[in-house]
Amino acid sequence: MAELAGVYAASHGPMIVRNRDKLTTAENETLDSAFIELGRRITAARLNALVVISPDHWVNFFIDNLPSICVGVGEVHDGPPEPWLKAFPHRKLAGHPALAEHIVRTAVGHDFEPSVSYKLTLDHGFCIPLWKSGIAPLPAIVPVTFNVIEPPYPTVKRCYAWGTMLAEAIASYPGKLRVGVLATGGLSHSIGEPDMGRIDEAFDRDCIRRFEDGDAPALLDFLNARLPAAGNGASEVRNWVAAHGAARGRGFELIHYEPIPNVYVGCGFASWKLG
Amino acid sequence: MRDYWLSKLFFDLQTPAIAEEYRADRGKVLARYPLKPEVRAAVEADDVAGLSKLANPYLLRFYFLMAGMPEDDFLRRIRSTGTSRG
């Protein structure tokens, strides 16, 4: 049987890469050290596969047909299309079709109806954390997109349930694999909105405290009350909620948090306690 | 509510070749999209506030970045719209 060997979260703001020359030395050092510590933990977990939960930033999907949740079951995924990510070292990323298809089957058995894609392109949401954390070697990637950029969004309750289902899928996979889960995005930020650039540090710190505590009902109540006012980008915390579910609400250890105005994002990095 | 063809224009402009064509000749690219006259006028006027009511905010931000509007200018204009959108 497969083993859940690590659950992680990391911000993925484009400006981390695109604006690197304009960030202060201290900001770059803070981000670099947080990503490196995250990568050290992921590498130490010796993963065979990594399920990465991220939004699709209008790369694979459009308002013609916008899946709430999509699982990438392909043998290979395309690297990021953003011109400013040309230096990303992988034009192709290996997938894990057997694990991905098992996750889909398990999801359907738990009354989810995920979309399935045999050909996903992984944008900065996936690739910035994979790149900046320096994970070596890169495990097989099972990408899962959550629609958290165009309403209606999945509820936080549903995201948590997806995470608990994901843990069951990994545990029941009939193969000897070490599997990790990485949620990307968040914390608070606002993009293309009237409050663009605002970082809700109070929200972020409250949110982190609740993730640390591991009390899932309290976390979900908090997010239902506060998430809508924390900026449209904060919606990506839903990905973290799924990771929290995968870790069965055990609570996480914060690697680092810092609101970085030049990135527009309250940047957070964490790994969950798996006991 | 989103304006479909405006959103489609923004979405398609993520393709670098189309973006390059757009920057060289806006009218030529706009002619391929059945935009409502008032929407096309808003595009031609770089009307951030007007367009912000019609498209996803991520696509809106991408569009003006792609079109070459300086970041400070975009921030000033989007902030002047005043109310959050969904």
Image (spheres, helix red, strand yellow):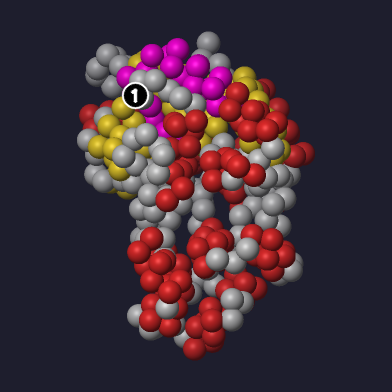
Residue type at mark 1 is Pro
Indicate yes or no whether the magenta region holds residue A51.
yes
**Residue sitting at x 37%, y 34%:** A89
- The percent position of residue A188, horizontal first and vertical second, equals 66, 43
Q: Is residue A175 above or below residue A15?
A: above
Q: Which residue is mark 1?
A: A139
Q: For residue B4, which quarter of the picture? A: bottom left
Residue B42 located left or right of residue B33: right
Indicate yes or no whether the magenta region holds residue B8.
no
Q: For residue A234, which quarter of the picture? A: top right
Characterize the local packing of mark 1: few (<14), some (14-19) or many (20 or more) Cα atoms within 10 angstroms. many
Residue nearest the observer in this picture, A187 or A80: A80
**Residue sitting at x 36%, y 24%:** A138
Would you say residue A245 is visible in this rendering?
Answer: no
**Residue sitting at x 55%, y 32%:** A10
The chain to which mark 1 is attached is: A
**Residue sitting at x 50%, y 57%:** A150
Q: Is residue A161 above or below residue B7?
A: above
Magenta stretch in the rendered image: A34-54
Mark 1 falls on what kind of element?
A: loop
Outermost residue to the bottom: B37
Residue nearest the observer in this picture, A178 or A151: A178
- The percent position of residue B33, horizontal first and vertical second, equals 38, 79
Residue A269 located left or right of residue A159: right
- The percent position of residue A177, horizontal first and vertical second, equals 30, 16
Q: What quarter of the picture does the N terminus of chain A occupy?
A: top left
Residue nearest the observer in this picture, A164 or A197: A197
